Amino acid sequence: MTEDRTPAVAENPEAEGGEEPEQHKGRKNGLYGEISDELAASMKSGWADTELHGLSPVAQAPYAAERRAALSAAFPGERLVVPAGNLRVRSNDTDYAFRASSEYVHLTGDQTEDAVLVGEPTGEAGHAFVLYLLPRSNRENGEFWLDGNGELWVGRRHSLSEQEQLLGLPARDVRQAAEELAAKAADPAVPTRIVRGYDAGLEAALADALDEDKDAGLKEFLSGLRLVKDAWEIGELRAACDATVKGFTDVVRELGQAVATSERWIEGTFWRRARVEGNDVGYGTIAAAGPHATTLHWVRNDGDVRPGELLLLDAGVETSTLYTADVTRSLPINGRFTGLQRRIYDAVYDAQEAGIAAVRPGARFRDFHEASQRVLAERLLAWGLLDATVYDVEKVLELGLQRRWTLHGTGHMLGLDVHDCAHSRREEHVDALLVPGMVLTVEPGLYFQQDDLTVPEEYRGIGVRIEDDILVTADGNENLSAGLPRSAEDVEAWMASLA
């Protein structure tokens, strides 16, 4: 990384568009001092015009417009503010990679940091939506090369005119957003709502006009708006699953290197595929070998990879449009299950089969979970891990006794977030019926901890989960991640073919 991200203090001539002069501050210990007049003059001139014209709208633009229409209908007469979020400092003057808020992306198709979507009420006509975005770096005042977020440091961004063509929305300078919105929000006749948690500066500017409960209602609505995916979103999730299949295949091909190194090799191998095929991984990869597989969210990924044990790999590629897959396979590291490993694996597989079969229009969201849990409870009784002389399967499920080894729910909604629609209303989510267009995971598991004295010693340290991404269709369901084998026989044959 280059050392001097922001050179020296430079007082700017008046900026384009009537903006006040600014100062771009350099590092305290930067290597350059004052900027000479000659250098400043040189940097102002000799640059080609790179403005883009005749751009086509992004693919999701018409779908985003439909979502905004639904939002407008839900909150007539209210001002709606949906921020993308800001950069977060990782260390000193370096930032974490930016990931725009899912609410903002869903409504705009844009992923720009610091941006804000605003819906201004227009009476019975609904809302006039506008995007507040950062314009291209100013070349007159030196921002483009003196500021740490100038284009010579972080790359060219679209002009406001270009963004209007791409997104189908009018665009304004985001540096005016807080002041303009605060002035409008001072009028109590028009209530203002904001999606909280993404832009502290905007929240502070609008604090006197906001109501926490009403803001929570906006977030709840926008979360529920994502419950049913449109055709474009389903296509993105298909692409995410297809790329994830490639990532798992890469990992199996490189298990030898992982044995020679650690779980980090597995994590890195999958991440490479995610970056090549899309934006990133959709969540922290769980590359859990051996007893680490019994820790549900093992993301340290620093353990040994030993032949004879299982690898639980839970990973998903996030597309360039930020839709993620979420897939898990439990793989024998040497390519063959032991007898006990296979017994446990087959129980989880059968539970997943029962869960997937329960996914269909009109079924309760809870049905697939209950179907999977029943199978696992039956196996735990059959193996003697639960006392069949005391409990039958109905009593086990009533008391939740199977949860000592199944631990988690059997699935969740999937989309822009790996746990999508998490803030939606219970009555339209976990207490609702499934409808075509919903996408959810089915992911039963069994986990026998190393220190669990209630199970035979040979079970301890074995963890198995199988997870796939399931689309509810008009007549049943479709497994979007079916490109990866699931049965024990198919897993072994697949791994052998890649050896």
Image (tube, grey):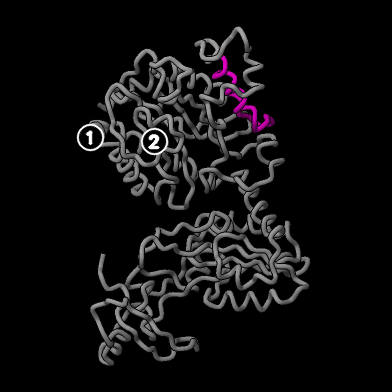
**Looking at the image, residue 387 lies above or below residue 496:** above
Local packing at callout 2 (Cα closer than 10 Å; few below 14, some 14-19, many 20+) is: many
Apparent side of residue 461 relative to residue 31 in the rendered image (left or right): right
Of the two numbered discs 1 and 2 on the same chain, state the one appearing first in sequence.
2
Residue 344 spot, x, y in % from top left: 44, 18
Q: Which residues are magenta?
A: 357-378
**Looking at the image, residue 460 lies above or below residue 69:** above
Q: What's the residue at 56%, 63% (across, down)? A: 83
Which residue is most to the top?
389
Q: What's the residue at 30%, 88% (across, down)? A: 40
| Circle on res. 257 | 1
Say what amino acid the circle numbered 1 marks: Gln
**Looking at the image, residue 24 lies above or below residue 58:** below
**Looking at the image, residue 492 lies above or below residue 383:** below
Query: Which quarter shows the C terminus?
Result: top left
Front position in the image: 492 or 208: 208
Q: Is residue 381 magenta?
A: no
Secondary structure under badge 1?
helix
Residue 275 spot, x, y in % from top left: 35, 49
Secondary structure under badge 2?
helix
Answer yes or no: do the residues labelled 1 and 2 have beta carbons within 8 Å?
A: no
| Circle on res. 125 | none
Mark 2 — residue?
245
Apparent side of residue 323 relative to residue 227 in the rendered image (left or right): left
